[in-house]
Image (cartoon, rainbow, N blue to C red):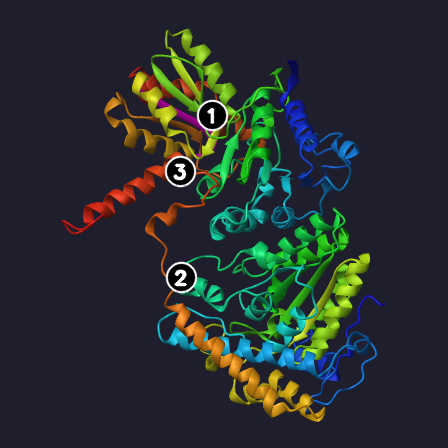
Amino acid sequence: MSTTMSAGSTRSPRDRRHSPQGAPAPDHDLAGAVDQPLRVLDEDGRRRPDARLDAHLRDVDEALLAGVLRDMTVIRALDDEAVALQRQGELGLWPPLRGQEAAQIGLARALPETDFLFTSYRENGLAWCRGVRPEEMLSVWRGTTLSGWDPFAHRMATPQVIIGAQTLHAVGHAMATSTRGEDGLSVACFGDGAMSQGDVGEAMVFAASFRAPVLFFCQNNHYAISEPVGLQTTVPLAHRPAGFGIPSLRVDGNDVLAVLAATRLAAERIRSGAGPMFLEAVTYRVGPHTTSDDPTRYRDEAELETWRRRDPLLRLERHLELLGAPVEQLREQAQQEGREAAEALHAAVSEILAPAPESLFEHVLTEEHQGLRRQREQLAALEASLAPAGSAS
Amino acid sequence: MTTMTMAAALNAALADSLAADEDVLLIGEDIGTLGGVFRITDGLKDRFGASRVIDSPLAESGIVGTSVGMAYAGRRPVCEIQFDGFVFPAFDQIVAQVARLHYRTGGRVRMPLTIRIPFGGGIGAVEHHSESPEAYFAHTPGLRVVTVADPQDAYSTMRAAIACDDPVILLEPKRRYWGKGEVDTEVTTDLDSARVLRPGRDATLVAYGPLVVTALEAAVAAEDDGIDLEVIDLRSLAPLDRGAVAGSVRRTGRLIVAHEAPGTVSLSSEVVAGVVEDCFEHLEAAPERVTGYDVPYPPAALEEHHLPGIDRILDAVDRTLGRRSSREAA
């Protein structure tokens, strides 16, 4: 296996343009060229042969595809519901994942649940596949907790808000488990913006030097809030790991089978002891960065329309149709599950209550220290003093 | 009981911790084959292997960040930051991750990291090798910040820090590495409490880390003037043992706090504020602070003017006792 496995890495003549100063002009469209990444399903849903990936898709049948369609449909429904709940004032904020369903479900369904995930905050598709309850995903965004679920129960760390910081955690986790002879992978999930963070560079250095069993999974969704990926890089992101000695693949992140196969390929290689690997899933954030964002300020409708046509769910449905599967029925079943999940979430969200004021002081250290006890008692005394006369404390 | 240097005591504590617990591991720059630039980890890689005494790439955020992941996997990493001035690239991982993960996860994820930092000046070093960054960390909830002052304290505190389930920033006074003392490896200590190293009646002199030795020397010198100083080693900078300081000030009525770090928004600010809150009515004079000046750490040729020494401490003692000091002379 060559160090860089990026398909179609030949740069177009346009990339060789030089600015008047002689420096290469950044090509902000380069990473958007989806004809470059590895792909199994074309935009019409037709299966195309791929020498690298086909070997990892031998078990794909209608049942598997229907399961993946169900996952993607349900997380989209939950995502839409969360946006609605934010608009209704039930959540403070929500980061929609619309458009990235194939990248997330393809990754999650390729890995055993024993592999440990260290993710950013938009990977609710992974959380769904790991059995996290939707209301647990929302609780952080409702402001009632800083961590929605038990990381060890779901083998998925608390989502990271500091961009790229979790990549080092994944590498350290892998360094620790591999020296004990455990064969699990640690997976670092991050986005195109994170590729500019020093921590991601350091994570790749450590992973390569210690041959840590880490999968770096970059969802290039084209935007870091308003900044296009061309501001983070002038070459495909998947080119960068080669400099660290980490092989990489660039895949169409809206092709769930390509992501599934590439992840299986990478995981098999990493589990063999070959060290880390990097996948760039080229996808698109169809929605805003968060519900507070206004993407009309930085991208045009034509671009959005192009990517809507590349919708990962539509592509999978077209593929099922071409296979002769009862796609209407499968879609309806999946959407029904999505509706039920969304309704259950809608009902559950108002049950997510603010914790008691005293919990403000809990778990700062493993034991409460004197100074904190004093502050807790002072707050309790103040609140008691403010309580209406005659009311129970 | 053996006589050894603080460096040897720290080395022994690391070795004993590695031997006692398979989950303990060391990671840092040059700590393996070289044994650390100060030789604190000398011989440990040979004894415990390269997977437990890890020479890391030259990246401090990477050292601390990978240690977070190791803690997720149940390990107890001991990180070495080679010099105080090199900790800042790791600042985000320390204050935004290490300090918060236990709180963030409602107690589900523990971060039993020990982050060792040789700190302070007085060794004639180039820039970035003599810093006192303790206030940044003491300001951050979720971290324990402890200092050591002598070989026994260094041994026992290191053992306690590594055994503790909380993240601990352990500040080692590098100019005291080669001071000798008796060490009993059976002696245990906690990470919370200050200690009275010298009882006295006239004023309370609070110090920590490298200035503990200086404070004790100042107390001996003060005897010549008939002044009886009580010397307190804070040891823990976070949480702060306010009770020990207030208890002493209630007896002496006077307070002097000394440290190398600049005084503005510093540990001495916090100690004085605590005394004012806890026992204002016992103060017989305004508290005095003897600190590094509010300047970036100066070139080595100037550091003797910058660092609090015996003369500056005694001058402050004179002021708090209403004796003639340099400020009246001027």
The residue that disc 3 covers is: B264
Of the two numbered discs 1 and 3 on the same chain, state the one appearing first in sequence.
Answer: 3
Q: Nearer the viewer, mark 1 or mark 2?
A: 2
Residue located at (40% from left, 31% from top): B268
Q: Is residue B259 magenta?
A: yes
Query: Looking at the image, which is closer to me, B313 or B117?
Result: B117
Query: Looking at the image, which is closer to me, A115 or A376?
Result: A115
- Residue A137 vs A319, above or below: the answer is above
Q: Identity of the amino acid at label 1? A: Pro
Q: Nearer the viewer, mark 2 or mark 3?
A: 2
SS category of the residue bearing label 3: loop
SS category of the residue bearing label 1: loop
Q: Is residue B111 magenta?
A: no
Q: CA distance from mark 1 to mark 2?
A: 47 Å
Looking at the rendered structure, whether the residues under marks 1 and 2 are on a common chain is answered as no
In the picture as drawn, the residue positioned furthest to the left comes out as: A389
Q: Is residue B288 left or right of residue B19?
A: left
The residue that disc 2 covers is: A143
The residue that disc 1 covers is: B308
SS category of the residue bearing label 2: loop
Residue A287 visible, this orientation: no
Mark 3 belongs to which subunit? B
Query: Looking at the image, which is closer to me, B234 or B104?
Result: B104
Q: Position of residue A345 (x, y in %)?
A: 44, 72
Q: CA distance from mark 1 to mark 3?
A: 15 Å
